Amino acid sequence: MMVNKVEICGVNTAKLPVLTNVEMRTLFQAMQAGDTAAREKLISGNLRLVLSVIQRFTNRGEYVDDLFQVGCIGLMKAIDNFDLGQNVKFSTYAVPMIIGEIRRYLRDNNPIRVSRSLRDIAYKALQIRDQLVNRLSREPSVAEIAEALGFSREEVVFALDAIQEPISLFEPIYHDGGDPIFVMDQIGDEKNQDGQWLEGLAVREAMRKLNDREKLILNLRFFEGKTQMEVAEEIGISQAQVSRLEKAALGHMKKYV
């Protein structure tokens, strides 16, 4: 995904305006007094904020234009709901709303579909968790959340696992100034060990020592998973002949493996 491209959704990002705090306050006052033009200026003046947020989602394979549009929706919601009376910078208020909007988009467009009932349980569990943290002044256990929610511990765990966003194997998890460490670097693969790789090479080398008919029989039997009867029908010999040739071929291969 190219986030550094100049034009996104027809907007030349290199020429986006930047508003000062004084300009922001003046425009918010005008917008809240009913000036729609002020709202448009607030939106265009904060598009750089959207650009900075979507940088966090560059490794998910989504089109930058789509993320930018979704981020703009979050920005507009933040602008419409911002309270000038609160002693907080607009960016501090807007960034979580933009992130939330993008995460909802990614969740709803996730190829891994999660049922509505599971999502409801998970979101209720997260709400209960926050309530328990405030009440207990500590992180509650899953059992405590399940009890407060009225579900079994297993149901809560399953629901929370279901709404976890998938992560790319190429997501960097550590960077010390040199080459980054990716998720895939921390995952073992017992099915692809060096010993098995070398064994596969030896098997292929041994297969080359067989004649064409023996190669065909072993390929049909052990690579395509066919029965001896199916092999016999395919190559036009008896099942007994297939059995005999198969044993002879395996015997020859043992000399080289």
Image: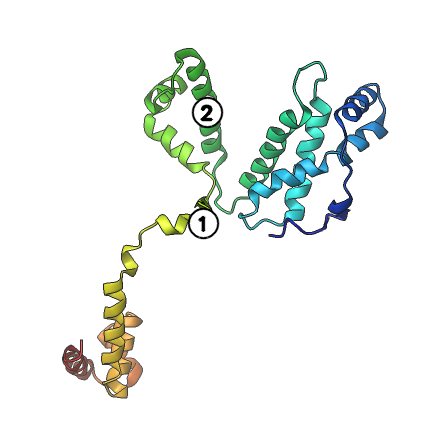
- In which image quadrant can residue 21 be found? top right
Residue type (three-letter) at the residue carrying disc 2: Leu
Measuring from the top left, give residue 70's x and y in whole percent: 66, 39
Q: Residue furthest front?
A: 177
Q: What SS does tag 1 mark?
A: loop
**Residue nearer the viewer, 38 or 227:** 38
Q: Looking at this view, is 84 or 131 the one in front?
A: 84
Is residue 56 among the parts visible in the rendering?
A: yes
Q: Residue at x 45, y 29 (%)?
A: 122
Residue situated in front as seen by the camera: 91 or 37: 91
Q: Is residue 76 left or right of residue 204?
A: right
Confirm whether residue 12 shows in the render.
Answer: no
Residue 93 in the image: above or below residue 208: above
Residue at x-position 46% and y-position 36%: 163
For badge 1, the amino acid type reads Pro
Q: Is residue 255 above or below residue 185?
A: below
Q: At numbered mark 2, what does the secondary structure look like: helix, strand or loop?
A: helix
Q: Position of residue 82 (x, y in %)?
A: 70, 21
Colour treatment of the image:
rainbow
Please give the label number shown on residue 58.
none
| Quadrant including the C terminus | bottom left
Q: Give me the C-alpha separation between circle 1 and circle 2.
A: 32 Å
Q: Quadrant of residue 175?
A: top left
Above-or-below relation of 103 to 232:
above
256 to 145, vertically: above or below: below
Q: Which residue is labeled 1 in the image?
A: 180
Residue at the image point whose x is 56% and y is 37% from the top: 103
Q: Tell me the residue that label 2 is attached to.
A: 126
